[in-house]
Image (cartoon, rainbow, N blue to C red):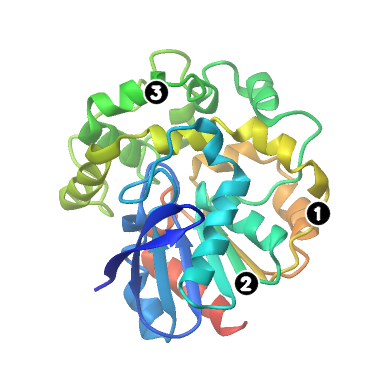
Amino acid sequence: MPQHREVSVNGITMHIAEQGEGPLVLLLHGFPESWYSWRHQFEPLAAAGYHVVAPDQRGYGGTDQPSDVDAYSIFHLVGDVVGLIEALGHQQAVVVGHDWGAPVAWHTAMLRPDLVRGVAGLSVAPGPRGPVPPLVAARERFGDGFYQIYFQEPGVADAELNADVRGAFRKTLAATSGEGANPAAAPLAQGGGFLAAMPDPETLPGWVTEADIDAYTEQYQRNGFTGGLNWYRNIDRNWELTAPWQNARITAPALYISGDRDLVRAFYPPEFMDHVLPKILPDLRGVVDLPGCGHWTQQERPDEVNKALLEFLGGL
């Protein structure tokens, strides 16, 4: 079982779960998740000889939640990872991220290649920095009802999600999983809030239990969703801040894993995987496609994800 403790990192107190000894593997969660989203990865990776650490990232769970929206830029998030590697007493790490954790992993590898001996992203691939701010492009492509646009106004999505934490998790995890009726449509609803297009499932998908929902609910009832939502409120600011890295490549050995029913697939043009991704990741060691898998990659398909991660780690 993973052990839990707090560490001082980059000016905040961060809660981590860890297991095993050996080379460091950092597991970075997304929204709305926590360290708990990696519960199926600890034992296999630790048994293979790795020091496996999954933090609650800035604004989540047992980690500090700064009140200033500006405290959630990509530089703060990468700084947290850099500080965590040092606080754990390691010189380098393999950094693995899912959903929002993936951009943090990709940017850590790009900004601090000296610290990252391998990088893996689940669901979200690294994309080129576009000619206009991302939310401008998203509004033109998906409309004002796109969930990332809806998340921008402080207090609005916060209130909706906090009103029924358990219901928010049941709806979100079910609707955007591979077992959802149309997972790609869930975040594209026009009006009515983020949860409007997500039915409350009578039964949960087979990969998640009521006990899992209990765990997430308990974690989010402490501090709510605002910390995680503040990551979205820095999307266009991150585009501005990363201008010096226009067209930069990520040179670390890399792995990308995603499900073919992941809502994020709708964000990439058809030629992206074959022609764009290899240019950004010149040492791309593998692309793992999981048929029937939705957005919650490592929770929906833990065996396949663990196998791919162990093969990737073994080759470094």
Residue occupying the point 35% across, 34% down? 225
Question: Which of 44/228 is in front?
Answer: 228
Instruction: Give the percent coordinates (x, y) of residue 137.
Output: 70, 26
Q: Amino acid at mark 1?
A: Ala
Residue occupying the point 53% across, 60% down? 81
Q: Is residue 171 above or below residue 117?
A: above
Classify mark 1: helix, strand or loop: loop
Mark 2 → mark 3, Cα distance in angstroms: 35 Å
Mark 3 → mark 1, Cα distance in angstroms: 34 Å
Left or right for 127, reference 64 = right
Q: Which mark is residue 248?
A: 1
Classify mark 3: helix, strand or loop: helix
Pick out the residue farthest to the top.
Answer: 191
For label 2, the crowd category at 10 Å Cα-Cα, with few meaning under 14, some 14 to 19 and many 20 or more, is many
- Placement of the C terminus among the 4 image quadrants: bottom right
* Residue behind mark 2: 118
Q: Is residue 111 above or below residue 75?
A: below
